Amino acid sequence: MSEFKLEAPFKPTGDQPQAIAKLVEGIESGLQHQTLLGVTGSGKTFSVANVIEAVQKPTLVISHNKTLAAQLASEYKQFFPNNAVEYFVSYYDYYQPEAYVPSKDMYIEKEADINAEIERLRHSTTNSLRSRRDVVVVASVSCIYGVGDPSEYDHFRMYIERGKQVDRREILERLVAMQYERNDMDVRPGLFRVR
């Protein structure tokens, strides 16, 4: 198992060493809730990175919006370049829930636009969580929409080991069973081609 290894050109200073020690102590003693306070630019992200390295546990960081989540994910990737730091937010660029307007007797259908890159990042996150322990997931509150059942995710997963003989026909059949479509002209998610 890979360990969390924090890489930074600086060390904790000021109140940070004491805050880090108290947070680590709280986690190790089983505290369910702790709060780290600090003004913008005070090094809260760096302090939490030190806590992650000290406790060596998979970590979920929740942000109130996608923009801050992206910033935090970028910072944690710099602190943990050899670990899995994942960005997990709602894949909707636009979402209109279904609704009924009684005064007009009108039903409004659900409508959504899904961002393919964010969907790819969500799959990367799920894969990291299912295959390793050195994972930091930076998520927004809205990420819970459309998560799905982890066992279903495992059902739609294929392991191929480097250097191992594989049967081409079996791989093609497995891809079809996983709901991929064969398309020898187009290359995009959900399709595969055979040459």
Image (cartoon, rainbow, N blue to C red):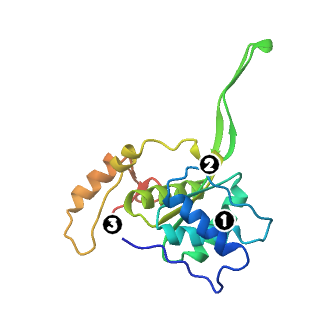
Label 1: which secondary element = helix
Q: Earlier in the sequence, mark 2 or mark 3?
A: 2
Q: Which callout, 2 or 3, points to the residue nearer the camera?
A: 2
Q: Indicate the quadrant containing the N terminus: top left, top right, bottom left or bottom right.
A: bottom left
Q: Residue at x 43, y 55 (%)?
A: 191
In the drawing, does residue 56 fall left or right of residue 142? left
- Whether the residues at callouts 3 and 1 have beta carbons within 8 Å, the answer is no
Label 3: which secondary element = loop
Q: Earlier in the sequence, mark 1 or mark 2?
A: 1
- Amino acid type for the residue under numbered disc 2: Ser
Whole-percent x, y for residue 93 in the image: 68, 48
According to the picture, the residue beneath numbered tag 2 turns out to be: 90
Whole-percent x, y for residue 182 in the image: 38, 53
Label 2: which secondary element = loop
- Amino acid type for the residue under numbered disc 1: Leu
Q: Nearer the viewer, residue 131 or 152?
A: 131
Q: Residues within 10 Å of mark 1 (few under 14, many from 20)?
A: many
Q: Residue at x 47, y 63 (%)?
A: 57
Q: Earlier in the sequence, mark 3 or mark 1?
A: 1
Q: Residue at x 30, y 61 (%)?
A: 159
Q: Residue at x 32, y 57 (%)?
A: 158
Q: Nearer the viewer, residue 186 or 149?
A: 149
Q: Which callout, 3 or 1, points to the residue nearer the camera?
A: 1
In the drawing, does residue 135 fall left or right of residue 68? left
Q: CA distance from mark 3 to mark 1?
A: 42 Å
According to the picture, the residue beneath numbered tag 1 turns out to be: 72
Q: Which mark is residue 195?
A: 3
- Amino acid type for the residue under numbered disc 3: Arg
Does the rendering let one see residue 86? no
Q: CA distance from mark 2 to mark 3?
A: 36 Å
Does the rendering let one see residue 95? yes
